[in-house]
Amino acid sequence: MAVKHFHHATLQVPDVAAQFQFYKDFGLTGRARGNNAVMRCKDRKQDQVIITEGSTMGLHDLSFGATKAGIRKIRKRAEERDDVSVIDPPKNAPYRGLWIRHDFDGMIYNVNDDPAAKSLGGVKPAKKQPEYKVNTPGHFYRVNEKLDLPIDTKPVPRRLGHMVHFTPEVDRKVDFYSDVLGLQLTDRSGDLIAFMRPAGGSDHHVVGFVKDKKPGFHHISFEVGNPDEVGMGGQSLLNRGYRNGWGFGRHALGSNFFWYVRDPHMGLCEYFSDIDYIAEDDKWTPRDWPIEVAFYLWGPPPPKAFGTNYTGNRKVVKPESISYSRV
Ligand SMILES: [Fe+2]
């Protein structure tokens, strides 16, 4: 028994209102809660991102869901280890449950017993979703009908899928997530990057971590309806004046289509579609991939900034003008 699902991420930023507006433009719904803001996906009764005010940009904490018995087991494991501390909930924390700190890098984790809320995404959406029909040689599924894709399509983020953070030591984080939270290693690339997931049916990864000198926030990622929504979502944010992160492309590990856009504090937010799904853990063997083939299958060359750790950034850049025009 261990963690069952990724519940939400809490980010701290200097300008809560600017971050709130970015996520609204990304397609999330939201409301202010005191000095914080809480973002959700349409028709999903689960907080997905909590934005809290801080002097610099960074990851405040990560929250996972588990059963009550699972939480007891995680607490016991945390207490047994000398590099993990059970801590009091941060001031004004909206979730109870267990709070622990991985003392190695100072990252804070919450494990609560809030079950995963139904969403419009994933393997079993709460409502029937339109089929994505494509025509490939020998497999024509859209026949006698035009592609139904209005030019002003706005993607609907269905659910928070995963997050990626920086760490000084990938091996230590693999050990922490597996030994304390009970996650499974899905794939890795040496000591540079690793992807992990809960057992018992999951996306390829709910958490990933990339080696850097210091810990920090890289990105959060939301599932949208199909690859077209990934493309149209990224394009629409560039149209609004936000900065490109990286995209449109297709990852190698996880296989998902991606487009990353920079938020006003230099964090990244990703639209994804068609990620690998592991239903039965014994049918997946984790592999160690050479970085040359692990990063992406196709797409524009990744900007150098894509791998930069901007945690600690104080600067806020709001979209000021339309930087891209279709005509
Ligand atoms: Fe991602």
Image (cartoon, grey):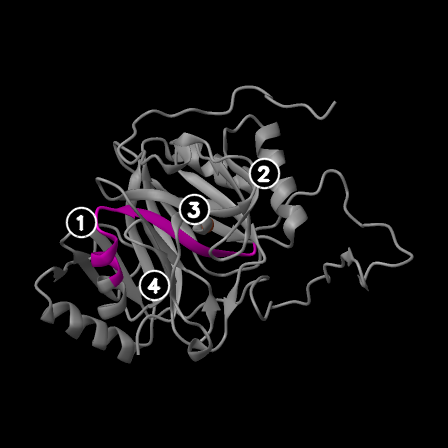
Asked if the beta carbon under badge 1 is closer than 8 A to the nearest atom of ligand 1, the reply is: no
Position above or below: 32 against 44: above
Q: Which residues are magenta?
A: 158-174
Q: Position of residue 87 (x, y in %)?
A: 14, 59
Horizontal arrangement in the rendering, residue 240 relative to residue 212 (left or right): right
The three-letter code of the residue at mark 1 reads Asp
Disc 1: which residue: 105
The three-letter code of the residue at mark 4 reads Phe
Residue at 59% across / 21% down in the picture? 323
Residue contact between numbered discs 1 and 4, judged by CB atoms under 8 Å: no
The three-letter code of the residue at mark 2 reads Gly
Disc 4: which residue: 64
Disc 3: which residue: 292
Horizontal arrangement in the rendering, residue 272 relative to residue 83 (left or right): right
Disc 2: which residue: 234
Residue at 11% across / 60% down in the picture? 83
Horizontal arrangement in the rendering, residue 31 relative to residue 321 (left or right): left
* Mark earlier in primary sequence (1, 4): 4
Q: Is residue 198 magenta?
A: no
Label at residue 275? none
